[in-house]
Image (cartoon, helix red, strand yellow):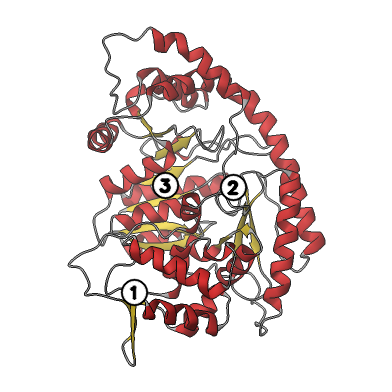
Amino acid sequence: MEPIGLVERLGRWSSGRGALYLLLAGRIRTLIDEGELPPGAPLPPDRALAAALAVGRSTVVAAYDMLCGEGRIVRRQGSGTRVAGPPPASSRTTTEVPAFLHLLEPRDGVIMLACAAPDAPPPELVEAYAGALPRLAGITGDIGYHPMGHVTLREAVAERYTARGLPTAPDRILITTGGQQALTLLARALIRPGDRVLVQAPTYFGALEAFREEGAVLRTVPVTLSGFARAIAKERAVLAYAISSFHNPTGTVLPGSARQRLVTTATQAGVPLIDDEVLADLGFPGQPAPPPLALHDDSVITIGSLSKLVWGGLRVGWLRAPAPLVARLARMRTVLDLGGNIPAQLAAAELLPHLDPLLRRGAAERLARHDHLRAELARHLPSWEVPAVPGGQTLWVRLPHGDAQSYAQQALRHGVAVLPGAGLAPDRTCDSHLRLHFLASPADLTEAVRRMTAAWREYESRPSHAPHPPAMAI
């Protein structure tokens, strides 16, 4: 196992009380006992794991010695360290994405800047549920299984696309349990093991996870999508995935001319293009939602969601695609869960026609918090590069030296969880970057920066790292 893989599985291992070696041994013990680290699985060498965790080698050695004494791992000269027992015939791994793993940890005083979504339902959502109750009470002769989604919501989503200049019939809409399920279904339908998929570097970690789950070989292009045509021809990709509006994590918006070139190139090559528009409505005041890529060619697959716009707990998303693909995905979804939560879909249908006032209010609040976080970082961590963004939810921060993965471990020990950039780029080109969201309250953002500053001072006190070379365009 590579050190990076184990580090991600460890989660918030160091945020408890007690000696670090005890905390580390305890977390590895849990992963072994739960089957996450199966018998025979290799563990990283002492020095490599210590460097990745930003701890001394003696911490890892002491943790390994304890587990070895318990019989949970074995250490042999020349063959390394492994989980005790013979390897199983086959084992299925679970996610290693830090942001996903943080969701499985208890709330323990750690300020979460790793996973971004509104953290409370707005009054409009409560009102939408109240408005949906009469429709729910009036349902008869319907067992509630709708793999394509309830027709009321499909019609509402189709109308919203039509209002944006993209005429859409309900049979082109599939309702999903958030945007993540849309990505999972598309990956399962369009990718076979060994297929090559083009993605931006960096990009949304959930998309990378969905594509890897199907055995995709990921190939990258810059966020600007420069060189996309060459990559299409060279890699013979079967699928391309882009976040063209308020990109996650960099916040950038693809210009109009580049949008058209992207669609034309993919269409002429016969490569399906996914346009992830989950953040497209999250521009700051004066920054309207850019037009969807499907305006340039109606075959583009578009993903949307209310989880980022309204509340993370509202697990309602959708995709817009050609009707035959929607029908195929609905058949696949029938096997997964027979369809989503109908009360939530009825509430979403109530909310969609009145979404714009909520988005305008949220835009002003997000801009204020964006400015607050940047100001705090400039004040306390002036050596960090923190570009402003026109919308979205995250800042893409570049450290002056060191690597973000190790620093993230240091920050965690100070009670703040940040997302290192290494997991957002398959080519590992973003090791010097952090993704920080700015959705927390100003007080929490201020406290988070205080903790990050203390962590950075400790991190810098370690043996010096060479400064990173000048940033390249992404």
Label 3 sits on residue = 264
Q: Mark 1 or 3 closer to N-term?
A: 1
Q: Answer few, some or many: residues within 10 Å of disc 3's Cα (few below 14, many 20 plus, some between 14 and 19).
A: some
For the C terminus, the quadrant is: bottom right
Viewer can see residue 473: no
- Real-space CA distance between mark 1 and mark 3, rounded to the nearest whole angstrom: 55 Å
Q: Residue furthest front?
A: 70
Q: Residue furthest left?
A: 89
- Real-space CA distance between mark 1 and mark 2, rounded to the nearest whole angstrom: 50 Å
The residue positioned 78% from the left and 65% from the top of the image is: 382
Q: Mark 1 or 2 closer to N-term?
A: 1
Where residue 313 appears, as percent x and y from the top left, is 50, 35
The quarter of the picture where residue 405 lies is bottom right
Mark closer to the observer (1, 2): 1
Q: Is residue 366 left or right of residue 243?
A: right
- Real-space CA distance between mark 3 and mark 2, rounded to the nearest whole angstrom: 18 Å
Q: Is residue 136 left or right of residue 79?
A: right
Q: Secondary structure at mark 3?
A: helix
Viewer can see residue 340: yes
| Amino acid at dot 2 | Val
Label 2 sits on residue = 253
Label 1 sits on residue = 72
| Amino acid at dot 3 | Thr
Where residue 447 appears, as percent x and y from the top left, is 74, 54
Where residue 207 appears, as percent x and y from the top left, is 42, 51
**Would you place residue 91 above or below residue 438 in this image?**
below
Q: Mark 3 or 2 closer to N-term?
A: 2
